[in-house]
Amino acid sequence: MVIANNLNEIKKTIPEGVTLVAVSKTKPIEDIQQAYDAGQRVFGENKIQEMSDKYESLPKDIQWHMIGHVQRNKVKYMAPYVSLIHGVDSFRLLEELDKQAKRNNRVIPCLLQMFIAKEDTKFGLDEAELIEILESEAFSKLQHIEIKGLMGMATFTEDQHLIKEEFTSLKAIFDKVKNNYSHIPSLQLTTVSMGMSNDYLLAIECGSTMVRIGSSIFGHRNY
Ligand SMILES: *Cc1c(COP(=O)(O)O)cnc(C)c1O
């Protein structure tokens, strides 16, 4: 019951309009089933193989989000069922996603991951790279991906001011793109994915519409 309780406590703090992604990476099927039984339907994983195994074993109305770094050669395994990919950080990956989505006769919803942290361990695009992709001829030809918004991770720090600055900068880029590029058909901008167990309330204050919460629901992970 711990998982159901955690989930309910967190849900009380999340306003309507903000989607909760329950990050279940490394956690067993039974834990996910408990969260499912408590009403949760959106789950996030960071490894394609692990997510696909869980997809096979669990109810089919779960929406699976890939929140980790994506290797292009593994896209094909999740292309049939993945519901949102948060970590898209290159045009080459978009091309592969488009190709595999087409093969599966579907459109794959994606978020472009932005680099907002003051550390060099996090993946993501900077603003210039983002604009370059959006304005490119090659991008305009992709018909099987849909960009739903942006994703970012703040620096791993106690410094609330820094985290706030980073979240605010992601929201500002999102607003700018929404204002300037909404004529592009494959951009359907609704989502700013930012905020984890330790910083999701701050992220929501800064305009997050999707929070990715793992350890506060499922407990700490043993790697
Ligand atoms: C693991 C992970 C999370 C969840 O982190 P918690 O601190 O456990 O809430 C969120 N986003 C990404 C990209 C992750 O890899």
Image: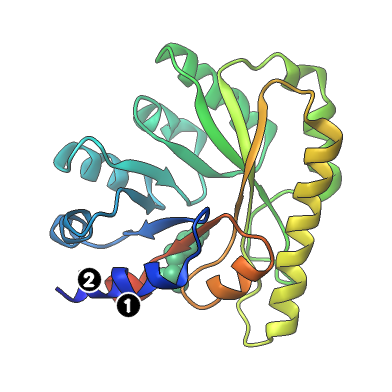
* Relative height, residue 153 to residue 175 (above, below): below
Which residue type carries mark 2? Ile
Q: How is the image coloured?
A: rainbow
- Give the camera-side residue of 195 and 221: 195
- Quick one: SS at disc 2? helix
- Does residue 171 show up? yes
Task: Left or right? Give the position of 88 relative to 43.
Answer: right
Q: Is residue 149 left or right of residue 177?
A: left
Ligand 1 neighbours mark 2 (CB distance < 8 Å): no
Tell me the residue that label 2 is attached to: 3
Q: Which residue is pictured at 34% across the width and 51% down the height? A: 43
Residue carrying label 1: 220
Percent position (x, y) of residue 37? 16, 55
The image quarter in which residue 2 lies: bottom left
Q: Which of the pair 178/43 is nearer the observer?
A: 178
Residue 222 seen: no
Q: Residues within 10 Å of mark 2 (few under 14, many from 20)?
A: some
Q: Amino acid at mark 1?
A: His
Name the image quarter holding residue 54.
top left
Q: Are marks 1 and 2 in contact (CB under 8 Å)?
A: no
Residue found 49% across the figure and 57% down from its top? 16
Q: Residue at x 79, y 48 (%)?
A: 175
Question: Is the distance from the Cβ of mark 1 to the nearest ligand 1 atom less than 8 Å?
Answer: yes
Question: Looking at the image, is 8 positioned above or below residue 38?
Answer: below
Looking at the picture, does residue 102 appear above or below residue 133?
A: above
Which percent across, then down, holds residue 127?
82, 48
Q: Residue at 65% across / 17% down in the picture?
A: 142
Q: Quadrant of the N terminus?
A: bottom left
| Residue 220 at x, y percent in the picture | 32, 77
Q: Disc 1 or 2, which lies upstream in sequence?
A: 2
Instruction: Using the image as rendered, state which of residue 89 and residue 180 is in the foreground.
Output: 180
